[in-house]
Image: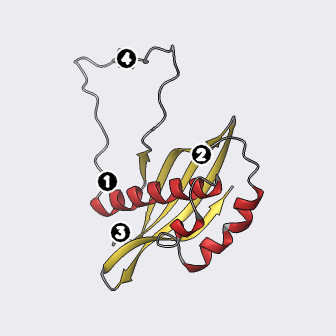
Amino acid sequence: MSCVVPVVNYEPPVLGSAPQRVRLLRPRSSPGPRRPTSPPAPPAPVRAAAGFADAALRRVLEVIDRRRSLAQLRPLLAAGLVDSLLPVVARNSGHGAARLRHLRIQPIGTDGSAAEVAATYSRGERTHAIACRVEQVPTPTGLRWQVVALHIG
């Protein structure tokens, strides 16, 4: 099951630009009015994984941009992943803040306890890719989501 989850755009509109309106057109071959249909809502575990992945990837980008400390990623990422970000943070040249753009999530298995995530982010005029795998891991207080694999392009 493939599910595309739009990422909420936290950026304000460009000053002086009018909001764009979307106009739905009916195909000529359609005899009656057509109502736009939205895709069915993804199941709850997929929505939970998408929400966690969105928040986790935003924090990763904020750490790379040095807007957050590396220690804030420890609860979200598996043990070795936090330390693997040190070289990425060190080589960040500061060409503007990274902004997460699109997120696509692919559930793994049928129980909804794991998912693979592909996303794009922009920094300045360039678009980059970032991907991760999130899984539910047992803790003394119950299951929680954690990033277990991360690739930054």
Is residue 51 rendered to the left or right of residue 15? Answer: left
Q: Is residue 26 above or below residue 126?
A: above
Kindly indicate whether the residue at mark 3 contacts the one at mark 2 (C-beta within 8 angstroms).
no
The residue lying at 35 percent from left, 71 percent from top is 110
Quarter of the figure with the C terminus: bottom right
Q: Is residue 133 above or below residue 126?
A: below
Q: Position of residue 77 (x, y in %)?
A: 52, 71
Q: Which mark is residue 112?
A: 3
Q: Secondary structure at mark 1?
A: loop
Viewer-nearest residue: 122 or 2? 122
Viewer-nearest residue: 45 or 1? 45
Label located before the other in sequence (2 or 1): 1
Q: Position of residue 123 (x, y in %)?
A: 66, 42
Gap between marks 1 and 4, in whole Å? Answer: 26 Å
Q: Amino acid at mark 3?
A: Gly
Label located before the other in sequence (2 or 4): 4
Residue to which mark 2 is pinned: 121
Q: Which mark is residue 109?
A: none
The residue lying at 52 percent from left, 18 percent from top is 15
Gap between marks 3 and 4, in whole Å? Answer: 36 Å
Residue to which mark 1 is pinned: 42
Q: Amino acid at mark 1?
A: Pro
